[in-house]
Image (cartoon, grey):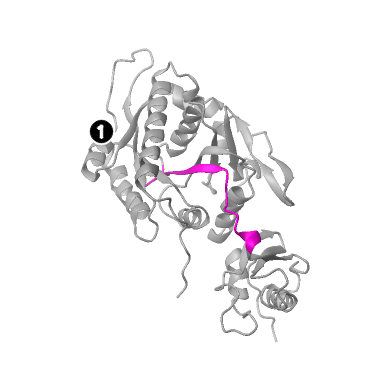
Amino acid sequence: MSETPRKLIVPKNVTDALRSVTFPGGNENIVDLDMVQEVRLAGKKISFSLVFQRSDDPNMEAVIQACEETIIRELGEEVEIKGNITPKAIHQMERPILPGVKNIIAVASGKGGVGKSTVAVNLAVAIAKTGAKVGLIDADIFGPSIPKMFGAESIRPTGEQVDGREMINPVEQHGVKILSIGFFVAVEDALVWRGPMASNALKQLITDGNWGELDYLLIDLPPGTSDIHLTLVQTVPVTGAVIVSTPQDVALADVIKGVSMFQSKSVDVPVLGLVENMAWFTPEELPDNKYYIFGKEGAKKLAEETGLPLLGQIPIVQGIREGGDEGVPAALDESSITGKAFMELAANTIQYTEIRNKNFDPTKKVKVSRK
């Protein structure tokens, strides 16, 4: 008789397996009771925290043993789980994720090819130039470009023990703290990951990063709407979203979908405004000339129609592309055409973040419901 094939070791299969473990004396399983926290995977090693109401709960040992037996039975005897389950009392889990971060800003786009990562990098640099403390997470797990755009491809983040946890120190370039999956894989390697693996990688960049005190943490999301977007809003309360588009009709149609996702009742993240990238072409030697090669003011008109602010219009200039390739963001030169455009974008993003915080309650993390 052939052996039953084992399930993949991914976070979803870990939590699904643990749904068969019920808390003694009740009918609810430990996952629905929100006892399973901080699931981490490293090869065949599985670790997580089990949250109990009290540190001296008499059921602690029995529940841990049941978890170990369940994981081995469901995912295979080769998994490393023994000794990797950490019991914690509920008061130990009440610390918020990223307690030192004041604002978390998602930078998103409805489709690829609109220069979203270029905008995210230069917006982060421009905000940092105002004196704010800024971080940037490259959440485009399958196509990480932030290390190259910061000229940091050869740099590797260091680890540090903080309050008994192994944390990752972000790389700091041009006044911005950055983390990307690109720091941990070879440049030439293609990432062929299933959705849960990518989501878990993003969680680790957020929760294991030693971010410290930040005024703004920008998250450069993949294009479109995906598991990564849901993972973000389920992991941290996002202050607001900035949506990047070009003036083309085909790009603007996808912007509406992105705006709808963030403003939907289930996600409920305020959209701070739109950014029109590639708004016009300006030759650097003819700074007063504008050529509307992708259409004129499409995102500006859409902003007016939807009632959203237009945070900035960024022209196409050869220097932006060269700066991205060479790791020298265009926003570093405030006297250039693009430097001025990105400083204006930064000022507007800061202004509308302050307006959002004044007029709306703090965003809550999206709760995962299972029917």
Q: Is residue 151 above or below residue 273?
A: above
The residue beneath circle 1 is: 295
Q: Residues within 10 Å of mark 1 (few under 14, many from 20)?
A: some
Give the position of the N terminus as an image quadrant.
bottom right
- Residue 356 left/right relative to 118: left
Count of number-bearing discs: 1
Q: Amino acid at mark 1?
A: Gly
Extent of the magenta region? 91-112
Q: Is residue 51 above or below residue 358?
A: below
Judging depth in this view, the residue of 359 and 293 nearest the camera is: 359
- Residue 117 left/right relative to 190: left
- Asked if the magenta segment contains residue 103, the reply would be yes
List x then y, in percent, for residue 369: 46, 69
In percent of the image, x 74 and y 52: which residue is there?
A: 164
- Residue 169 left/right relative to 296: right
Judging depth in this view, the residue of 34 and 280 nearest the camera is: 34
For the view shown, which residue lies furthest in the right direction?
83
Q: Is residue 65 above or below residue 42?
A: below
In percent of the image, x 53 and y 55: which residue is there?
A: 235
List x then y, in percent, for residue 151: 59, 29
Mark 1 falls on what kind of element? loop
In percent of the image, x 64 and y 41: which residue is there?
A: 183
List x then y, in percent, for residue 158: 72, 40
Q: Is residue 275 above or below residue 126?
A: below
Report if residue 349 is visible in the image: yes
- Asked if the magenta segment contains residue 154, the reply would be no
In percent of the image, x 47 and y 47: which residue is there?
A: 222
In which image quadrant can residue 326 be found? top right
For the view shown, which residue lies furthest in the bottom direction?
1
List x then y, in percent, for residue 72: 72, 75
Report if residue 152 is visible in the image: no
Give the position of the C terminus as an image quadrant.
bottom left
